[in-house]
Image (tube, rainbow, N blue to C red):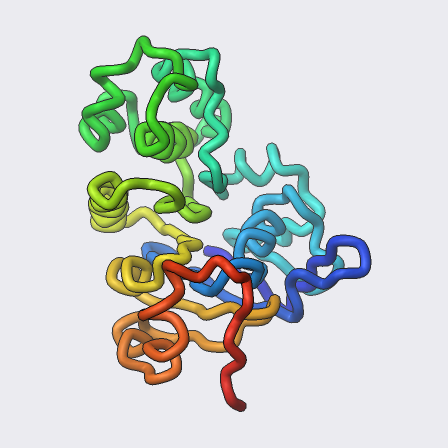
Amino acid sequence: MLEIASAVVSYGRIQAVRDASLRVSEGELIALIGPNGAGKSTLLNAASGLLRAHSGSIMFAGHHIAGWRPDKIARAGLLQVPEGRQVLGPLSVEDNLLLGRQAAAGRPPRHALDDIYRLFPILQERRQQKAGTLSGGQQQMLAIGRALMGCPRLLMLDEPSLGLAPIIVKQVFDALRDLRETGLTILLVEQNASLALAISDRAYVMEHGRIVLGGPSAELRHDPRVIEHYLPSIDADASGDAPVFPE
């Protein structure tokens, strides 16, 4: 479904992503973990067309999409839930959801409004409320629902647990589990390594712009390097300093 090969993404002279490669097969939930500043969000933004990869290739559903406009990529079915939610605050919850349909581009709808409301009942209760007045957790649910209305073939989520209370994080991740059970393909960037590895099929570890580890999530949860460097500390790491795995 998605294959990124030897991607390099830079901000001026600074290489944020260096020779990074990953793949996501249809129906998989793939996690991308790592500390702040590792390049995880940059890699997602390159896949969705918000940033341009300077070299390497990005293929989605058999098409080379590097250089495509973000709207064309979204209409092809690669949709991103951005870090920070970015809902349209002055519009109602329901209007935000309906705007998500613009990305569907004629694909048969996978999720209707009623499906979103079943997944996140609070959104139905507040469907006429302005999105900007919702709590952070409710805005995160709305951002996910808006993307689902676009009929994604692959859904990318950037730090969905960021800044949320534990009870809301559980609700969001329960919803992701439900979506996984429906066969939706998901690429999840998440700094909470424990949650990400618990929910995903496979995972990649990124540090200093590079993919340094990858494999089945069940195996990575027991990998001594992941346990030492990530599982105890990544959720609290605010320094942006990444460990360096031995060769």
Of residues 199 and 75, which is closer to you in this image? 199
At x 33%, y 82%, the residue is 223
- Going by the picture, which residue comes out furthest to the right? 13
Q: Is residue 154 visible?
A: no
Dividing the picture into quarters, in which one does residue 21 lie? Answer: bottom right
The picture places residue 115, in percent across and down from the top left corner, at 23, 28
Of residues 145 and 168, which is closer to you in this image? 168
* Image: 223 above or below 175: below
The picture places residue 63, in percent across and down from the top left corner, at 59, 52
The picture places residue 116, in percent across and down from the top left corner, at 26, 27
* Image: 93 above or below 63: above
The picture places residue 119, in percent across and down from the top left corner, at 21, 32
Dividing the picture into quarters, in which one does residue 43 lie? Answer: bottom right
At x 31%, y 28%, the residue is 138
- Total numbered labels: 0
- Going by the picture, which residue comes out furthest to the top? 128
* Image: 171 above or below 12: above
* Image: 76 above or below 234: above
Q: Is residue 127 visible?
A: yes
At x 32%, y 70%, the residue is 232
- Going by the picture, which residue comes out furthest to the bottom? 247
At x 61%, y 66%, the residue is 209
Of residues 99 and 123, which is closer to you in this image? 123
Of residues 184 and 17, which is closer to you in this image? 17
